Amino acid sequence: MTASNLDWWRRQLPEDAQIIWSGRPYQGFFPPHVRWAYGILCVCLCLAWIASPWYADTVRDYWKIVGCTLLLAFYMWWDRFLRSRRVYVVTDNNVWWLSEVFPAKSLSIHPNLSFYRSGQNIVFSRLRFLVFEYLTDPDAALAALTKARESTS
């Protein structure tokens, strides 16, 4: 990707916005806190394929296994695709959830804005539509949010 492709999100922000922090969700194949669930699903599918000669009597039974395998593969690809095209930004006046796929979401920063850390996520109280998910460094995001909230007081 070129530098202009990596900075697509800067064009969505107002020109006078001062960026305090920006971050992306975890870019690995499996999100850290659901990695175990993906592992269990993959093991179950492998066992289904291994045991299929004993329980799959018709072609339709094999198509069920193929369908489940393709569905899981598509879901894992789609989840990674969405995370790779998402950026979280804290500016001096707003919190932004930017995506190349979905419309941008923003929340204005005010002294009563409350947020908390939940694992690797930053959740905004009373406004569950905006969550910074799968952060690699949620402490940096919390520090930036606290700084932005204190500067508006």
Image: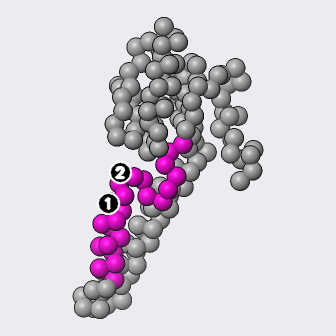
Q: Residue at x 48, y 7 (%)?
A: 153
| Label ID, residue 99 | none
Magenta residue check for 38: yes
Magenta residue check for 33: yes
Tell me the residue that label 2 is attached to: 33
Relative placement, left or right, of 119 versus 22 is: left
Task: Please rate how many residues cluster around mark 1, counting C-alpha atoms within 10 Å: few if below 14, some from 14 to 19, many from 20.
Answer: few
Q: Residue at x 42, y 53 (%)?
A: 31
Tell me if residue 102 comes above or below residue 32 in the rendering: above
Please state the horizontal and vertical placement of residue 61, each as a whole percent of the image.
Answer: 32, 84
Tell me the residue that label 1 is attached to: 37
Disc 2 marks which amino acid?
Answer: His
Image: magenta residue range: 24-49
Relative placement, left or right, of 3 versus 119 is: right
Circle 1 — which element? helix
Please state the horizontal and vertical placement of residue 16, each as a whole percent of the image.
Answer: 70, 20
Relative placement, left or right, of 48 versus 138 is: left
